[in-house]
Image (cartoon, rainbow, N blue to C red):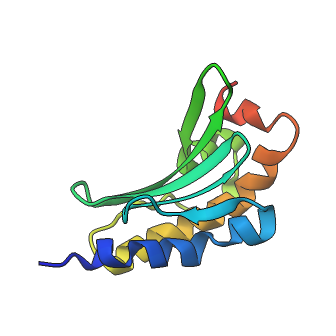
Amino acid sequence: MKDARLASFPTDAVRELEFMAKEFGLDGPRTPRPEFVGYVSGPWSIWAILEVRNKTVDTYVNYDAGHSVLRAPVWYLVRKAKLTGAGQPKNGALTRAGVQKSLAAQARALRLLLPLLLADGGTDLMGQ
């Protein structure tokens, strides 16, 4: 049986996350596998990942510090940055509609986070 969530994930993720290329200059989308959609710029990479078995979708921000790669989920960064306007965490992916809602919520949070992360000292949010 074909999983509509997986079949539509690349399209749904790009629709929500393409602002990262248009507004912030990240390169992408990159889709090495249907359940991964990513954007990169220098040491930064941001990946939306559909976990089919766990029925979740999460977006992770990665920073390659040279000696290590720092990785954090979007909702962790929202809490750490104290972004009260980012909305409620969503990562449910029981249905395609659930995937779309979770991606939309994570994209809203990223719009608020990216200016902070890409600014001087932004890696402080990542734990460095």
Extreme-front residue of the structure: 32
Q: Can residue 87 be seen?
A: no
Return the residue nearer the eye: 25 or 87.
Answer: 25
The foreground one among 43 and 118 is: 43
Query: Would residue 5 appear left or right of 2 to someone viewing this image?
Result: right
Residue ID at (57%, 50%)? 74
In the rendered image, the vertical position of residue 70 relative to residue 74, given as above or below: above
Position above or below: 16 against 86: below
Give the percent coordinates (x, y) of residue 2: 18, 78
Residue located 76% across and 45% down the image:
117
Location of residue 50 in the rendering, given as x and y in whole percent from the top left corner: 37, 60
Give percent across and percent down for residue 94. Answer: 27, 69
Question: What residue appears at the point 65 percent right and 33 percent down from the top-left corner?
Answer: 64
Choose top left, top right, bottom left or bottom right for residue 106: bottom right
Task: State the quadrant of the C terminus.
Answer: top right
User: Does residue 14 appear in the picture of this structure?
Assistant: yes
Residue 114: name its quadrant. bottom right
> Residue placed farthest to the right in the image?
120
Instruction: Pinpoint residue 29: horizontal percent, then vertical percent.
Output: 58, 66
The structure residue drawn at horizontal position 71% and vertical position 63%, both measured from the top left corner, is: 111
Closer to us: 81 or 95: 95
Residue lying furthest top? 67
Q: Is residue 59 left or right of residue 20?
A: left
Numbered circles on residues, count: 0
Please state if 101 lies on the left or on the right of 43 as rendered: left
Quadrant placement of the N terminus: bottom left
